Amino acid sequence: MGDRLYEPTDRPYNGLRIPGTLLRQIIHLDMDAFYASVEQRDDPSLKGQPVIVVMGLDASHRHGAVATASYEARKFGVHSAMPVIKARRLCPQGIFLPVRLDYYRQVSRQILEIFARYTSLIEPVSIDESYLDVTGNPRDAADIARALKQEIKTELNLTATAGVGPNKFLAKLASGMQKPDGLTVVRPDQVQEFLRELPVEKILGIGPVTQKKLNALGISTIGQLAAFDRIKLKERFGKLGLQFHEFANGVDLRPVVPDRAHVQISRETTLGSGAQKAAGSNLPPSLMQLLAPMAADIEGHLEKEGHSARTVTLKIQLENQHPMTRSRTVSGTVWQREALLEIARSLLDKVNLKGTRVRRIGLSVSNLVSREDPNQPQLFN
């Protein structure tokens, strides 16, 4: 797909400023249907087929949750976090495959190695998504994004979608504009034009409940939010109101934090509308299937850094409610996925799910310590 530019291409990216913030060159890069694309790459017979990669897939192919669906499968309404039994009903001709998380991690490391050719400021958000700060690179960020996409395609036979902007918020928004295999570049002096007509729910942290409250104030677009009185927003939404106003004006000072020693490691997933209904029965096994790959990913990061965790936190957001967390701090430490899931299950048991729908669920660990510390015994050795 062609690039989408929000500034004439003959104008330089460097040297421009947004009022109230520092100019940076940030790339957000998101792999396209990552798990399914890896499977299609490795087995040419799957090219063009509706491939559905499933977490917790059993022999009957009736249990589990969709991790990733290829774009061919998405045409039938299949999406991540959907129960496999519903995915099979929507797409009976689909090819259902089990998750190979350890293998996908290997491919992810290859992608990170490509990123490292251009910058050391790389912040992986998940196994298939990262922010890169290329401010110190003399090349234009848009050119770097094109080069990254091409090198990933040439060396790994995979496609990625990239967004370029002067901060993380704008780069992330941009990367969602042209999937798959797209590139959207938001130049600093075109930020207002880019944001003006986008729906307000595109802003990080604005879910259905907050959206309704903003709509009641006459705010349905980001442009309207940007023009709204920030003091009134603070009175209505607290500090979040100020953050919403900054984002709406294209301001985001969050740095790109390299994937080094973590204070906390967290993973989350949002359930689509179909998954909300499916989760209405609130069967913990289906939610545990969503938590399993998160636990495995956290285990991988802890293993790489030689860390264990003292605290495990479950984050869950029910429909029309604010997110809630449940935490457990253990007497020793924990790092293996089985132990993380066992704690997550005990935390999930403390949440009243009766008659509700789950919108978002996540798992995190904190209070990290070195495994070499002899005073920190591990659980589940």
Image (cartoon, rainbow, N blue to C red):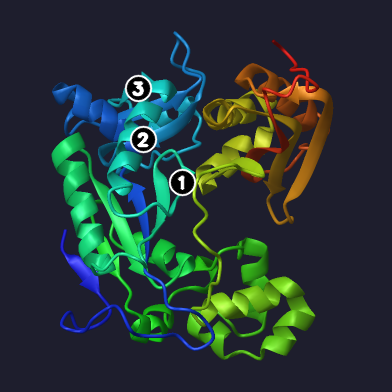
Left/right placement of residue 286 relative to residue 93 reads: right
The residue depicted at 69 percent of the width and 76 percent of the height is 241
The residue depicted at 22 percent of the width and 51 percent of the height is 149
* Quarter of the figure with the N terminus: bottom left
Residue under numbered circle 2: 108
Q: Which amino acid does label 1 sit on?
A: Pro
Residue under numbered circle 1: 124
The residue depicted at 75 percent of the width and 24 percent of the height is 333
Q: Which amino acid does label 2 sit on?
A: Ser
Left/right placement of residue 137 relative to residue 373 reads: left
Circles 2 and 1 in contact, beta carbons < 8 Å: yes
Q: Distance between the residues labelled 2 and 1?
A: 10 Å
In this view, the mark in front (2 or 3): 2
Q: How far apart are marks 1 and 3 (CA)?
A: 27 Å
The residue depicted at 15 percent of the width and 22 percent of the height is 45
* Quarter of the figure with the C terminus: top right
